[in-house]
Image: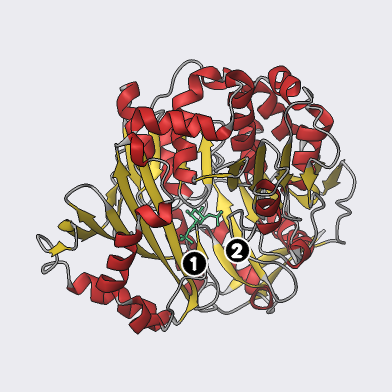
Amino acid sequence: MSTHSITTKPFDGQKPGTSGLRKKVTVFQQPHYLENFVQAIFNSLDNFQGKTLVVGGDGRYYNDTAIQTILKMAVANGFGKILVGRNGVLSTPAASAVIRKYQAFGGIILSASHNPAGKDGDFGIKYNISNGGPAPEKVTEAIYTHTQTIKQYQIADFADINLSQINTIQQDDVVIQIIDSVTDYAELMAQLFDFDAIRTLLTSGTFSMKFDAMAAVTGPYAKQILENTLGAPQGTVMRGECLADFDGGHPDPNLTYAHDLVEIMFGKSAPEFGAASDGDGDRNMILGKRFFVTPSDSLAVLAANAHLVRGYQQGLAGIARSMPTSGAADYVAKALGIPYFETPTGWKFFGNLLDANKVTLCGEESFGTGSNHVREKDGLWAVLFWLNILAVRQQSVESILVEHWAKYGRNFYSRYDYEGVDAQAAEALIHNLRQQFSSLPKQQLGSYQVDFCDDFSYTDPIDNSVSTHQGVRIVFTDGSRIVFRLSGTGTEGATLRVYLESYEPDVTKHHMDAQIALAELIALAEQIAKIKTYTGRDKPSVIT
Ligand code: G16
């Protein structure tokens, strides 16, 4: 084998966002673009020679091409062993599980998550560290710095490797092992959950469910676990084949983009339980019969019922949620007498808390829930957790939520997304909000009085690193909030996210529709931020 040192020049804009570098496929297809970023990852790491790297992706268009390049670069840069998912496929949580199980040095995950795929779609790449979690900011900053000064990259010269069979290949000094994409992950799930109880539920004849894999990576995982192992009828998993263009869809498991599932779950003969996962398998949406569970509530319910589930029976060390996520889980943590944490948006912020055993469960409003079993959020894990709870409690999803709200109060919650707006206009809108920080406090706006407003900043309690400008908060005296943030995962223009929350202890009001309960806050968001004036949009593109 010969290795080459290829001369290159930096590209602008290779700054990792909320979760790695996400760009159009056509951007990644430019000569040297992918290679520069991969070399920048390796340049930011120390002492990896001879160690193990995990590589896999969500199977989207360009996954197979990119994997071959990464294998050649990993070999040239001196890794000793590379574990790669069969056909280059590993869901994000499965990649995290594999990194941890085989004590790898780290992993490269190819995914643009829920963003559409295909020739004109999005592609993405991120680096995960040895704990299995997304690289923390100090690593992503170092990667970015290297992308700005890169002059050459190293690549080995060998033929593309056939990744379609489980196999171990010796490439000179390097072992390339092609592993089954599902096995290690499925074994981990079987340790955490009572598969016998779930099997009994799924085969009882009185319970049915639908899982929408959205033609993305969770298809093979869900079919193997739900249908083949747990006995759910064939067809329980819909859109279970992972296609390179995700069948032209937008694999974001929410009420807008998972509309086929939503129609089934809100239809006449709706099953008892419905769930969907996203492009790379880390997000989840949970539905009951004609009932939507907000991701914030889902985290709270999992926490409140964790004692019923084998893997969590020893109790929870604590709970963490991202700042825009509703405070529903905080009430559970208070009742359990365990600590709770509020972090910036981005799963990477949970890593230190999990490693230090300060928290066991984490969650985000963006349809992400997970635990200390891996260092990523995990869609299918959340589905199995819910199924385990349903198997034990023998109640409907709705009745579990109604009881939960009666005990802890209800956090009415909604998120409005304005996708693909002009980036400068979105920045100007945020700037205008910051200009109001001194004038808003104490103002009475309708029935709400502003308590404080700020730009959320976070000091990591473990390493004391500080992250600033993590979202503008307008908090009212009754604890209700409006949060404004610009997404860090889009690839076109900007996405403005507006998060709305109010807490309702009165059980007689818990049945209200969230949009009605939040109507005044929704109007206030427009009044304060002048969304229409800045963006030209009079309604959001997605409401969750
Ligand atoms: C990523 C991050 C999440 C974050 C989400 C939305 O998820 O891992 O922590 O909540 O993006 O981020 P933003 O609001 O900046 O778009 P995923 O599933 O896209 O990897």
Disc on res. 154: none
Q: Relative to the observer, which residue lies in front, 417 or 154?
A: 417
Q: Ligand 1 closer than 8 Å to the CB at disc 2?
A: no
Q: Is 9 drawn above or below residue 4 in the view shown?
A: below
Q: Residue at x 48, y 63 (%)?
A: 17
Name the quadrant containing residue 538: bottom left
Identify the colour scheme used.
secondary structure
User: Which residue is pictured at 24% across the width and 76% down the height?
Assistant: 432
Label 2 vs 1, first from the N-terminus: 2
* Label 2: which secondary element: helix
Q: Is residue 308 left or right of residue 334?
A: right
Q: Eyeballing the image, is 315 above or below 399?
A: above
Please indicate, yes or no, whether residue 12 appears anywhere in the rendered image.
yes
What is the quadrant of the N terminus in the image? bottom right
- Looking at the image, residue 504 sits to the left or right of residue 74; the answer is left
Q: Is residue 157 above or below residue 230?
A: below
Q: Please tell me which residue is depicted at 45% across the width and 52% down the height of the picture.
A: 346
Q: How far separated are the C-alphas under marks 2 and 1?
A: 8 Å
Q: Nearer the viewer, residue 420 or 392?
A: 392
Residues under numbered marks 2 and 1 in contact, where contact means CB atoms less than 8 Å apart: yes
Q: Within the image, what quadrant is residue 232 found in?
A: top right
Q: Nearer the viewer, residue 216 or 233?
A: 233
Quickly name the residue at label 1: 146
> What crowding class fits label 1: few (fewer than 14 Cα within 10 Å), some (14-19), or many (20 or more)?
many
Q: Label 1 sits on what residue type?
A: His
What is the x, y in percent for residue 240?
80, 49
SS for dot 1? helix
Residue 74, percent across and down?
Answer: 69, 55
Question: How many residues crowd mark 2 within 10 Å: few (<14), some (14–19), many (20+)?
Answer: many
**Residue displayed at 88% across by 41% down:** 167
Residue 273: x, y in percent? 66, 37
Residue denoted by label 2: 39
